[in-house]
Amino acid sequence: MPISTREQMQRRDVLRELLQRGAAGTQKTLVQALNAKGLHATQSSVSRDLHEIRAIKTGDGYRLPEVSEQQDEMNKVAEFVREVLPAGPHLTVIKTAIGMAQRVALALDRSGWPEMVGSIGGDDTVFAASNSAAAQKLLIAKIERTRH
């Protein structure tokens, strides 16, 4: 039975909460913790989720990268972002200063924000793809926060 995008996002949010409390030794441990919270999870779904939330495997187990590591990338290029607009439910158009779109796209890619699937940078425009309308709204909010 297919899992809805909402359920997937809920599971990923709980995974983030679990990993913020400390490293998780194994994927099996995470599956058990998610199931205990009433969320359907398998080893393969947890593996995909860990990849999507950009979790890192260390000697102590899985953990999230430091927020400062992710946010620094966007803070470095925030001054070049001119406008952020939705273009349908999955595509966000980011207008930049002339010649800065590729740099902004690279910073977005390096930010590790799970709301973004990928980006394409031209000269002064970036297209950022999200896998849902909800993810797009979160992405736009994060970009706007870096600008202010």
Image (cartoon, grey):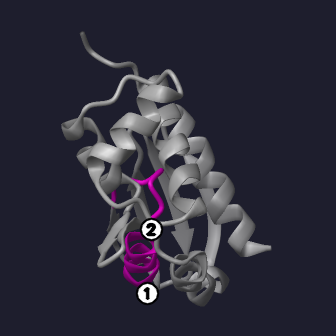
Whole-percent x and y of residue 40?
Answer: 37, 23
Quadrant of the snapshot with the N terminus? top left
Residue 99's tag is: 1
- First of labels 2, 1 by sequence position: 1
Label 2 SS: strand
Whole-percent x and y of residue 52?
Answer: 34, 52
User: Residue sitting at 60 percent across and 61 percent down?
Assistant: 21
Depth order, front residue of 113/36: 36
Type of amino acid under label 2:
Thr
**Is 101 left, or right, of 75 in this rendering?**
left
The residue sitting at the left extreme is 44
In the picture, residue 75 is in which quadrant?
bottom right
The residue sitting at the top extreme is 1
Residue underneath mark 2:
125
Residue density around tag 2, few if under 14, some if 14–19, many if 20 or more, within 10 Å:
many
User: Residue sitting at 38 percent across and 45 percent down?
Assistant: 30
User: Residue sitting at 48 percent across and 47 percent down?
Assistant: 15
Depth order, front residue of 130/51: 51
Whole-percent x and y of residue 74?
Answer: 56, 79
Whole-percent x and y of residue 94?
Answer: 53, 62
Q: Which residues are magenta?
A: 101-118
Q: Is residue 105 above or below residue 75?
A: above
Spatial separation of the CA atoms under disc 2 and disc 1: 9 Å
Secondary structure, magenta segment, majority class:
helix
In the picture, residue 45 is in which quadrant?
top left
Q: Is residue 58 above or below residue 53?
A: below
Residue 111's tag is: none
Q: Is residue 120 above or below residue 45?
A: below
Type of amino acid under label 1:
Gly
